[in-house]
Image (cartoon, grey):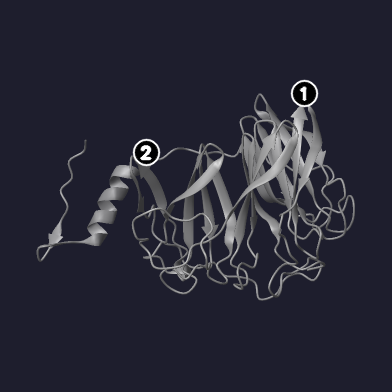
Amino acid sequence: MIGVSIPRRHGVVSLASIVLVLLGIALPAAADWSQREKITSTPRGVGAQFGHAVAVSGNTMVVGARYDGTKASQAGAAFVYVLNGAIWTQQAKLLAGDGALADKFGASVAIDGNTIVVGAFNDDAPMANSGSAYVFVRSGTTWTQQQKLTAGDGTDADEFGNAVGARGDTVFVGAHFADLLKNPAAGAVYVFQRSGAAWTQSQKLTPIPGPFPMPPGPVPLTPPSPVLGDSFGESIAVSGDRVAIGSSMADVPETAAGAVYVYVGNGGSYALQRRSPFSTVRTATGSAFRWRWTATRWSGARPKTPRRPESRPTARPTSLPSAAGRGHRKGS
């Protein structure tokens, strides 16, 4: 246990002082990082965007190149590397078995052990830009496609596969533009479970409406009225039995302030544990928060001073596609 003296101003604890004290306790001693290697695919191709998505598990890494043109223009690819000593070497190049024009396979990647999942959010499966995800498994040094995943209730422009996560025999796939209960682009995350070599959809997670903090009591897994435009499923992170899901456009507590949902798994089913909106963050500052689970609750602190917004180019190179409209359409 650490004793801390917190300064007060006019008898009131200063929030800034609390943050500074928390940072002083939580931040570890600075570590020295040095670049070991620069990794590129062979061949990569002009505009392939190798490195758009990356994931690591043990000594294996997967890198997405969503505009790779091996199968078709912008069909996409993913590259697998293994660490031998201090050198990363390419083990495989993954391609969708039915890869087609502008599917953007490799826009998202996840790996756990000998299982890799790759998202192709612009795949027309079965409707335009409804999206898909592909599961690959390794035997020895060989990777093979095990199954193609799609949403059981997918519709056009859902972009299922924009984000993916993997843990053991469970895969999570985001569809950030899924329309729910007359709420456009509310978003959803689909949970798939593997039995033997077959994957089946076991659950669909959706955002919750209403005020925060949530009132006490159980939270329904599929609430009656999700809010529109939340982009729930924009990002996914998995660790142990917990999965964090980003909802970058949630109006909590302000317009598009954003939120993160934390779910906990139990017996293959995932229940909402906490919704953590960063209510003190102004989106223009580029602030970031660190959250830690301590026995019964999540607590957060800002790890460093917010940076100024990065300057952005006014126009993209004409040789690369651009995103426009509601989603990343074919050819965009």
Q: Secondary structure at mark 1?
A: loop
In percent of width and height, residue 217 lies at: 36, 54
Q: Is residue 54 above or below residue 67?
A: above
Rounded to the nearest angstrom, the CA distance separating label 1 from label 2 is: 39 Å
Residue 257 in the figure: left or right of residue 43:
left
Q: Quadrant of the N terminus?
A: top left
Task: Give the residue displayed 40% in from the left and 70% down from the top.
Answer: 253
Task: Give the residue displayed 72% in from the left and 71% down from the top.
Answer: 316
Q: Between residue 83 and residue 195, name the one nearer to us.
A: 195
In percent of width and height, residue 136 lies at: 76, 38
Q: Between residue 179 and residue 73, name the one nearer to us.
A: 179
Q: Is residue 75 above or below residue 310?
A: above
Disc marking residue 29: 2
In percent of width and height, residue 227 lies at: 53, 70
Amino acid bearing label 2: Ala
Q: Quadrant of the C terminus?
A: bottom right
Task: Give the residue displayed 80% in from the left and 58% down from the top.
Answer: 123
Amino acid bearing label 1: Gly
Disc marking residue 249: none
Dot 2: few (<14), some (14–19), or many (≥20) neighbours within 10 Å? few
Residue 97 in the figure: left or right of residue 163:
right
Q: Secondary structure at mark 2?
A: loop
Residue at the spot of label 1: 140
